Amino acid sequence: MTIANGRRVYIQEVSVRDGFQIEPTFIPTTDKVSLINSLSRSGLTKIEVTSFTSPKAIPALADAEAVMQQIERVPGVEYAALVPNVRGAERALSCDVDELNLVMSASATHNLANLRLQPEQSLAQFAEIVRLTQGRAHINASLSTAFGCPFEGDLPDDVVLDLVDRVVDMGIDRITLCDTTGMAHPVQVSRLCGAVRQRWPALGLTAHFHNTRAMGLPNVLAALEVGIVRFDSALGGLGGCPFAPGASGNVCTEDLVHMLQSMGYDTRVDLTALLSLANGLAQLVGHEVPGQVMKAGPSTRRYEVPPGVMNREPQLRFGGTASARPTLLV
Ligand code: COA
Ligand code: ZN
């Protein structure tokens, strides 16, 4: 494994979009705004604030304009929003988002289920959005189900590479490969992300993993090995697409930051601040959340030694025969 050596890694928070979009209970706008404001001060590179989707499709984020207008914008933090079509782009631009995160799926079936569009129709919308944005915001293209689709199964790498090609040709210089339902495994991540990095080394490439099958962090490690330094993740491990059966939480931000910092990467994120926010999440969403470090504490956590342990004589156990070596009980 490559030595981290203080290498900079950029953490992009998606809990308030990917997380809240699937929550059955509507999170009040003021609570969203207050969480985003706190996240803004924790050292994260980018926050995906909301999505400008149809309120019928995603009622949980029907307050997109209000949230965008009420948050405090901390200099140095980018504020992004998910955009499914031209109408969404117009709404996002009217709120001065820093980045339009356009979305389409690599799998045609998931694109139809999620956006009711054929991939070609999505690509046409992307081109139209690039035209109407006229450089007023960054544009990122998120390719969902890039590592597998819950309807179609595995996708040939070429399908994804061709899509990247089409998107790059439009002048889009930021792309996210999304593992929407946690089907990716590290060998595949290494292969596909490695191929994209090799073909488009200057592309701003993000990896977006879900931990549905406990492969989220291993996939991050595989992506780091092929040079990816931008990761989407969600506080507490919230997340999931309502139009992808079996979808569940993103890689958990504080677990990811904890792992990267332990390994010597430079995330610039305040882990203590994140843990404190993560600890308030269960109350906000009304159920337990999957994050692990928030429960166990960071690996630097130390416990008091139980009374008497240090001055206790080591207890010796002898095997069945007189010649057996004594074993220290541990
Ligand atoms: N914002 C707000 N409303 C929108 C909209 C947008 N970006 N795009 C369409 N609408 C509205 C239309 O005005 C129309 O409203 P009406 O019923 O009151 O007339 C309604 O939505 C249907 O419009 P239509 O163009 O037929 O879209 P659709 O029903 O085929 O839905 C999407 C297409 C993309 C808007 C919808 O599927 C969607 O928002 N999906 C969200 C996907 C998502 O966020 N998934 C999770 C993250 S990957
Ligand atoms: Zn996702």
Image: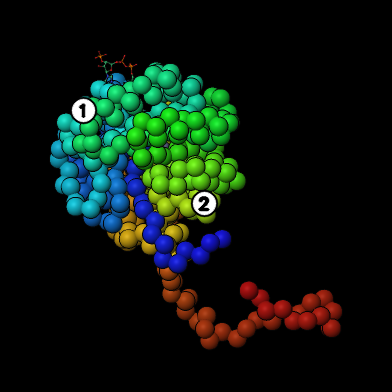
- Is residue 330 visible in the rendered image? The answer is yes
Q: Quadrant of the C terminus?
A: bottom right
Mark 2: secondary structure: loop
Identify residue type, mark 2. Val
Mark nearest the camera among 1 and 2 is 2
Q: Quadrant of residue 123?
A: top left
Residue indicated by mark 2? 226
Image quarter where ligand 1 lies: top left
Q: Quadrant of the N terminus?
A: bottom right
Front-most of residues 101 and 263 = 101
- Is residue 297 visible in the rendered image? The answer is no
Residue at 33% x, 46% y: name it: 13
Residue indicated by mark 1? 91
- In the displayed structure, does residue 140 sit left or right of residue 222? left
Label 1 beta carbon less than 8 Å to ligand 1: yes
The relative height of residue 296 versus residue 34 in the rendered view (above or below) is below
Query: Residue 261, position in %: x, y?
Result: 41, 63
The relative height of residue 163 versus residue 288 in the rendered view (above or below) is above
